[in-house]
Image: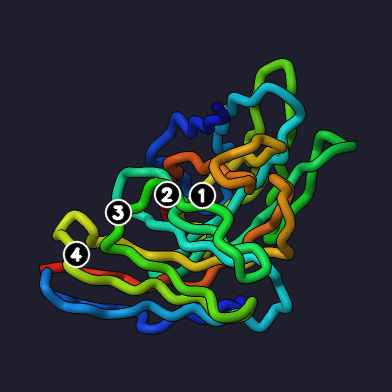
Amino acid sequence: AQSVTQPDIHITVSEGASLELRCNYSYGATPYLFWYVQSPGQGLQLLLKYFSGDTLVQGIKGFEAEFKRSQSSFNLRKPSVHWSDAAEYFCAVGGEIYSGAGSYQLTFGKGTKLSVIP
Amino acid sequence: ETGVTQTPRHLVMGMTNKKSLKCEQHLGHNAMYWYKQSAKKPLELMFVYNFKEQTENNSVPSRFSPECPNSSHLFLHLHTLQPEDSALYLCASAQGGYSGANVLTFGAGSRLTVL
């Protein structure tokens, strides 16, 4: 079964500092990988995705992520954090796995909450 | 505004009440999803509809009853809920088809409190 681990529950960084959020996945083939962000009281918004090709993917709001097959990781990075980046970040993996009645599940991690110190 | 609208945003109900959550998408997508988000737990997929047909029921108790009258609307009917059902219920839509590459667009959620 596919799974996602986000080892950091809560991270605090100073505004202007660099950020790296960790994500490890378990999946038997080439996965589809996603990062979503959730601001308080809101739904999830897609930051970026990896399907194939270049292992360094660029997303919205200045975020990027790197797919490392050898480490089963898809870490999210930003060189300089802004106060508005404070939110919860979710890594997710999807793949061609038959599940239940014939659809394919997207498995989410438990999330990492980011706090930003002014 | 994501193109996926959920109503109501907040709902408080007693254990014997019957209520419904509504989701509407204006993106032309063919797949719609219900997720449950509880504190300190990963998002739990509840139901998936592809082209109005239910393709996934993730062992959800029968006190939750989904309805998808067309590709743009999705309902979650609630009855005789338990306090542990209190959570944020998220609706999402996607292009559809059987693919793990589906990019989900989420609504803002309906915060449910069961007393």
Residue A6 position, x and y percent, is 48, 34
Mark 3 or mark 4, earlier in chain? 3
Q: Amino acid at mark 1?
A: Tyr
Residue beneath label 4, please?
B81
Residue drawn at x 58%, y 55% is B55
Q: Residues within 10 Å of mark 1 (few under 14, many from 20)?
A: many
Q: Is residue A85 left or right of residue B76?
A: right
Q: Residues within 10 Å of mark 2 (few under 14, many from 20)?
A: some
* Chain of residue at mark 2: B
The span from disc 1 to disc 2 (Cα, nearest Å) is 16 Å
Q: Secondary structure at mark 2?
A: strand
Q: Is residue B46 left or right of residue B10?
A: right
Residue B18 position, x and y percent, is 22, 78
Q: Secondary structure at mark 3?
A: loop
Mark 2 or mark 3, earlier in chain? 2
Which of the 4 image quadrants contains residue B115?
bottom left
Residue drawn at x 69%, y 51% is A63
Residue beneath label 1, please?
A89
Q: Are marks 3 and 1 in contact (CB under 8 Å)?
A: no
The span from disc 3 to disc 1 (Cα, nearest Å) is 28 Å
The span from disc 2 to disc 4 (Cα, nearest Å) is 17 Å
Residue B48 position, x and y percent, is 55, 59
The span from disc 2 to disc 3 (Cα, nearest Å) is 13 Å
Q: Residues within 10 Å of mark 4 (few under 14, many from 20)?
A: many
Q: Amino acid at mark 2?
A: Glu
Is B92 situated above or below A34? below
* Chain of residue at mark 3: B
